[in-house]
Amino acid sequence: MLSTLSVELLQEIGNELGKIDQQRLRAVAKDVGLAINPLFFSSLTLKTNELRLESSVDMLTLLASRKTGWSCYARSLNITVWHSRSQPAQMDGQKSEKEDVRKRLDLSDDAMGSLLASALGSMTNICSVSWWASNSDPAWQRAPFLGFLASRSLAGGPPLAHR
């Protein structure tokens, strides 16, 4: 029955849903997933204080490989420090903090910076970036973020909206 609806109508339905409900709807059928994917993968949050966690490194590796919907569809990027006192932030579709294995990986700053730069470079449709930068951000994070912003501004891609 859902497969008889147009992609545009399915996207309108999906646009009215929250991320959790979009995730459930995506699971219903491949055709529905094709219509919902651009909505589900439209935004991504990177938590700078958790980038060395195994789950975040896995996510950055997946982004760098361009084998995820965020590489194709992400239009909004939120770069923030996440405080544990608040409700856990998630990259849309990721496991909750309780489910996540909180294992920190011992990768060099150069390796992390390179991985972060590759992951950011895979997201070619980003139009909006919100970055909560601070003086305490390590250079291996700052350089890829600034490089990404500079390359998007100069590459003739969609103009970035900075917040």
Image: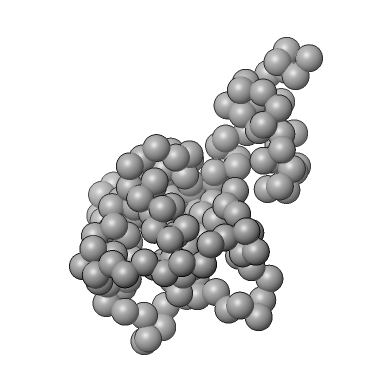
* 106 to the left or right of 30: left
Quadrant for the N terminus in the image: top right
Name the image colouring. Answer: one colour
The residue sitting at 68% across, 71% down in the picture is 87
User: Which residue sits furthest right?
Assistant: 1
Query: Total marks drawn?
Result: 0
Camera-nearest residue between 125 and 160: 125
The residue sitting at 71% across, 34% down in the picture is 25
The residue sitting at 57% across, 60% down in the picture is 100
Camera-nearest residue between 64 and 134: 64
On the image, which quarter does residue 3 sit in?
top right
Q: Is residue 137 visible?
A: yes
User: Which residue sits furthest bottom?
Assistant: 135
Relative to 4, residue 65 above or below: below
**Residue 127 at what x, y percent from top left?**
45, 52
Relative to 57, residue 69 above or below: above
Relative to 21, residue 6 above or below: above
The residue sitting at 33% across, 65% down in the picture is 145
Q: Is residue 8 visible?
A: no
**Residue 48 at what x, y percent from top left?**
44, 71
**Residue 146 at what x, y percent from top left?**
30, 67
On the image, which quarter does residue 86 sit in?
bottom right
